[in-house]
Amino acid sequence: MLNAINQKNVILLPGIFRERMQVNREYLLELDTTCLLQNFYLEAGIVLPGLQVIDNPETAKLHWGWEAPTCQLRGHFLGHWLSAAASYIATDKDIELKAKLDIIISELARCQELNGGEWVGSFPEKYFNKLENNQHVWSPQYTMHKTMMGLMNAYLHANNLMALDILDHLSDWYIRWTDRLAKTNSHAAYKGEEAGMLEVWASLYGITKDDKYLNLAKRYWDAGLFSKLLKGKDALTNCHANASIPLSHGAAKLYELTGDEKWRTITELFWKNAVSERGMYCTGGQNAGEFWTPPFMLGQFLGERNQEFCTVYNMTRTAQYLYKWTGDPLYADYIERNLYNGFLAQQNAKTGMPTYFLPLAAGSQKKWGSKTRDFWCCHGTMVQAQAFYPELIYFEDAATEKIIISQYIPSELTYQDIHLKQAIAMKYYNDQAFFDEHDDSQMSRWLLKFSIKSTQARKRTLSFRVPAWVTGKPSVQLNGVAIQVELHNGYFDLTHDWQDDQLSIFFPSELRVEALPDLPELVAVIDGPIVLAGLVKSDCGLTGDCTNPKTFLMPQTEHTYETFPWQQNNYLTRHQSQNFVFKPLYEIEDEVYTVYFTNKAINML
């Protein structure tokens, strides 16, 4: 069992992930506090300043889209905002976000008091009566889960004690509601997209040891999905993907709290059902139009509505649970692929806005959200996802005191007696030192440098994941001297008396293609974990040996003034009837692109 090292011990350093975190932080601060609270104020009977009557909706200072007062899902975004802000506060000690978060929590406490001391929802309590009476209503438990999750994270990561007090009173409301359901309609607890409720109740029990939270968890732990999984059935095909994934988080949390192997088995069966026995697109996604595709029938569902971002984030969280339990690099490889081709690819690098889906059909174009007019579910998930990176990089095997480097993201770790910095061995723009002739920087993003210091003179083992895409053995130098490393189960270990040492690691990689299981003539080009997109409006096919993409692709290494001094992972086709550029899918903004191409060599057989 591995322990994720607390994000409070990790800071991201300059690089693409830090850039994306920064544009996200700026957006969190930009959003108006009153607008974030607007639906909670309205439910509590608080008149918004200057909005007793709205004369012109176009100029009214309100959030619209899924946050509009007319939308039944209104209020979901604030919970994501709180969770994201809390992560920045923990990692970066962000005092501006801390001040804003504390104000919002105090206002939620005010709303709770005006609502009678328990309810702190952004919509009427009667929405839950609709669930009980089998009347249609749009996912009230989904919305409430986001608020509860945000409050819990504000307590855990931003040390806001009032947030836990709000949850304590809100839980009393849920006890009374679920007590009533036991007599009227017990199945109603599993309606309204309730999947996240199990994890939050279990987590609150873990935090407080108060039995009322465990009792609430019990009222949510008999989901029909669990029994289907335990019976060995395909529990997911054609089902709503994001309504199911959070159930795996709840089962995983229950296993960690209770040690009951049943919950671990359910989580593992979920993964098997969702990934191992279903396959995935080259990007890591498994769904289309919000629904799970049938097993290995991904090509049939290729279109404009692939890979809902909420599912990318939530499947990454499922993989993180499984990685902690097993240390299996398969899960870390899955996370890595989704970071590049989901977290980065579905966020606009300039505005921070999300794309709800990631189109994978030929001639696609991403559709970006707006800052205050959409607020899709994926909008909320995206702001939370961009604050998630520090939790994914470093882990510890407590039994051996081994520190595991799981993700290669420029960052700084301060933990116990160890101070570790990892970076890509290239000068960044802000260093203003590109043209230093003595600079030893290289032109590969997979050349990594680690600076390791320790305050104690003792041996300690660092374990480095070797990604599945690496070809051959990593090249490793310790203090400038080449050393041989032995690979074991996807890692290599270095045991050393770390004091003030420099470590260099190079991961060799080759371009490769991946085919769709049901349409093997359609292939995508992958560079390490990074999916490449062709800047063409149609599938014009690829001529050449797809077992060796270097025969028809050559690198483009123009000088740049962005994250890296040299263009990374960009290629130009050769020997094609129409030559065009391939670039990382995460760099695509408004261009028309194609990911899957016909392998003409197959068609000629």
Image (cartoon, helix red, strand yellow):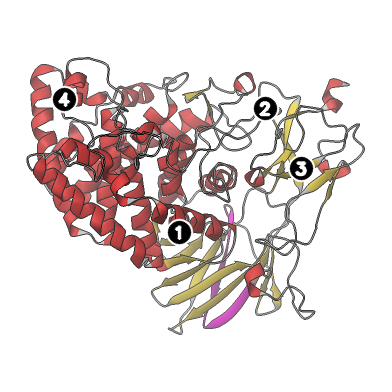
Mark 3–mark 4 Cα distance, whole angstroms, equals: 53 Å
Are there few (<14), some (14-19), or many (20+) residues within 10 Å of tag 3?
many
Are there few (<14), some (14-19), or many (20+) residues within 10 Å of tag 1?
many
Report the magenta residues as a range: 488-503
Residue 582 - label: 3
Label 3 element class: strand
Residue 126 - label: 4
Label 2 element class: loop
Per the image, the residue denoted by label 2 is: 516
Was residue 497 drawn as part of the magenta stretch in this picture? yes
Mark 2–mark 1 Cα distance, whole angstroms, equals: 32 Å
- Residue 403 percent coordinates (x, y): 47, 65
The structure residue drawn at horizontal position 26% and vertical position 29%, both measured from the top left corner, is: 140
Mark 2–mark 3 Cα distance, whole angstroms, equals: 19 Å
Q: Is residue 399 above or below residue 584?
A: below
Are there few (<14), some (14-19), or many (20+) residues within 10 Å of tag 2?
many
Which sits earlier in the primary sequence, circle 4 or circle 2? 4
Q: Is residue 35 above or below residue 25?
A: above
Mark 3–mark 1 Cα distance, whole angstroms, equals: 30 Å
- Residue 277 percent coordinates (x, y): 53, 27
Which sits earlier in the primary sequence, circle 4 or circle 1? 4
Which sits earlier in the primary sequence, circle 3 or circle 1? 1
Residue 390 - label: 1
Which amino acid is tagged 3?
A: Phe
Mark 4–mark 2 Cα distance, whole angstroms, equals: 47 Å
- Residue 460 percent coordinates (x, y): 48, 74
